[in-house]
Amino acid sequence: MRERLEQLKAEALEHLRSVADAKQLDELRVKYQGKKGKLTEILRGMGGLSAEERPVIGQLANEVRDAIDAAVSAHSERFEREETERRLASETIDVTLPGRKLPRGAAHPLNRIIEEIEQIFIGMGYQVSEGPEVETDYHNFEALNLPKDHPARDMQDSFYITEDLLMRTHTSPVQVRTMQKMDGEVPVKIICPGKVYRRDDDDATHSFQFHQIEGLVIGKNIRMSDLKGTLLQLMQELFGSDTQIRMRPSFFPFTEPSAEVDVSYRKKGAESTGWLEVLGCGMVHPRVLEMSGYDPKEYSGFAFGMGAERLAMLKYGIDDIRHFYNNDERFLNQFARQ
Ligand code: DAH
């Protein structure tokens, strides 16, 4: 038995020398050390040994097993090391290669002007609000002093969804929602940018869907001069410090008095100057304040609503409103930030 063990050890170690990879190594381990392996087979015969021989042979068997184990793990470590080296060699990257350029997007000119206007108003202490595009008749008309069958409803031809729900025709319903939420508290100082919808035939200056930015301020002793100063400040920040505004008397059911505002412009390059109407505004009508929980004897306010497309067209020299919605990359890429 002793000889068989010695022989087994010698054979295994000899065999190991010819092992070329991890798979062969594993096969060898099973062959000698596995449950049905050669060493196990020899040990099975130990039952027939005498009591003196058994510990001696047992110890030898352990030595043989340990020797094979040690040789197998030495090989296994070597294979692992070689494998890692091979992988590292095959995965080296050339860090001097130039990178692949990803195409860069550009902020849409409408988003850009809305963001800019938001920043100007945030600088004046306003908060930015939002409201739903699908509105109730009450918020869009009724609470803005436009009762059913009021002729001024025709000014805003609407998309109705049910008798009581419509696509908002302006951002003014956010005034009502804000007052309801504030529940009589002051000061109210918000702007609200958003999409609005009207039944219009699309052309160079009209679109069935466009963007407005609404403003509402309520407090004590708010006056028309506050409104004018605010709008002048806005336009000068937006278009340059020599910009002028002009207020013309107008009519809106939700303001009294009401005005339309023109902004002075100078066409880029050319010497042509002029006025462009950009917004409607006024002092919030006492009935509008009252309906949403503000006592008009105690509080007053101003409101305005401006067309984002108009302002963007003026600022960026765009001559057709449809450019905003066609998603032509040649147009949009001109607004990439530097
Ligand atoms: N909602 C009006 C429109 O769409 C614009 C407007 C006028 C808004 C006067 C106001 C305002 O807040 O006070 O034509």
Image (spheres, rainbow, N blue to C red):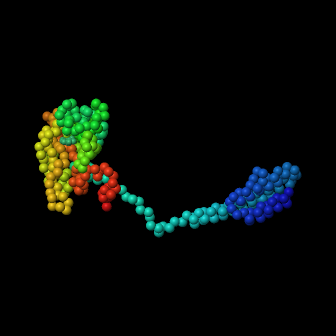
Asked whether the viewer can see residue 242, the reply is no
242 or 310, which lies in front?
A: 310
Quadrant position of ligand 1: top left
Q: Is residue 20 above or below residue 128?
A: below
Circle count: 0
Residue occupying image coordinates x 15% and y 58% = 272
For the N terminus, give its image quadrant: bottom right
Indicate the position of residue 337 as horizontal and vertical percent values.
31, 59
Residue extending furthest toward the bottom = 96
Which quadrant would residue 86 be assigned to in this image?
bottom right
Residue occupying image coordinates x 66% and y 62% = 79
Indicate the position of residue 40 as horizontal and vertical percent values.
79, 52
Residue occupying image coordinates x 19% and y 31% = 149
Q: Is residue 304 above or below residue 55?
A: above
Residue occupying image coordinates x 70% and y 63% = 20
In the picture provided, is 243 more to the left or to the right than 37? left
Asked whether the viewer can see residue 28, the reply is yes
167 or 132, which lies in front?
A: 167
Indicate the position of residue 274 as horizontal and vertical percent values.
14, 54
Indicate the position of residue 221 as horizontal and vertical percent values.
14, 41
Which quadrant would residue 87 be assigned to in this image?
bottom right
Residue extending furthest toward the left = 249
329 or 190, which lies in front?
A: 329
For the C terminus, give its image quadrant: bottom left
16 or 176, which lies in front?
A: 176
